[in-house]
Amino acid sequence: MITGIGHSAIWAKDVEVTAAFYQNVLGLKEAFRMMKEDNSGPGTIYLYIAPNQFLEIFADGVEGAKKEPKTIGHAHICYQVDNAAKFLEEIRARGAPIDTELKLGKSKCIQCWTHDPDGNAIEIMELPPDSLQALATKRLAGK
């Protein structure tokens, strides 16, 4: 049985720059590093999100085909927050690019959007009690 999402993994052009964005702008904490085989620097940096949940950043990503809307594959990562308005102002003050201001999503979540230095789309989401996600969690997890 699946018990949670262990990590999301991304390739970065510059692993240090990308890790710094997630730490200094979004507030994640570094969990650990794994060095490259030749010991020339970090090959992977793990950032802590929540208990047993991590962002895994791989070094030396290369430019690929430009990802367009509706391209098959992962579209974005979403980070849940307690207060989306407050978090938006915090990341704005830290220099995050704001792609979409706060809005009510179709599922009644409160959301805004940003992106990391490599262009990976990031959704920030608050789940009010009447959001479809919160109602589903209450129904399916008995919470």
Image (cartoon, rainbow, N blue to C red):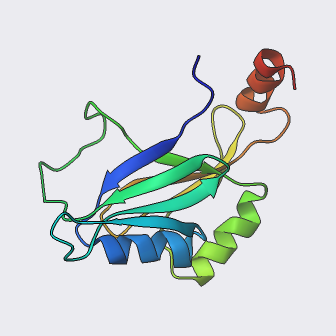
- Locate residue 32, reporting x and y percent: 48, 65
Can residue 100 be seen here?
no
Can residue 3 be seen here?
yes
- Locate residue 130, reporting x and y percent: 83, 32
Q: Quadrant of the C terminus?
A: top right
Q: Nearer the viewer, residue 11 or 127?
A: 11
Q: Quadrant of residue 68?
A: top left
Residue 29, above or below 105 = below
Point 47% across, 54% down: residue = 55
Does residue 90 appear left or right of residue 97 in this picture? right
Q: Residue furthest front?
A: 38
Residue 66, above or below 71 = below
Point 57% across, 82% down: residue = 94
Q: Quadrant of the N terminus?
A: top right
Q: How many dots with numbers?
A: 0
Q: Nearer the viewer, residue 98 or 137?
A: 137
Q: Nearer the viewer, residue 37 or 2?
A: 37
Residue 38, above or below 57 = below
Does residue 140 appear left or right of residue 55 in this picture? right
Does residue 90 appear left or right of residue 130 in this picture? left
Point 67% across, 76% down: residue = 90
Q: Nearer the viewer, residue 4 or 83?
A: 4
Does residue 122 appear left or right of residue 142 in this picture? left
- Locate residue 14, reporting x and y percent: 26, 73
Point 49% across, 69% down: residue = 22
- Locate residue 102, reporting x and y percent: 65, 57
Q: Quadrant of residue 56?
A: bottom left
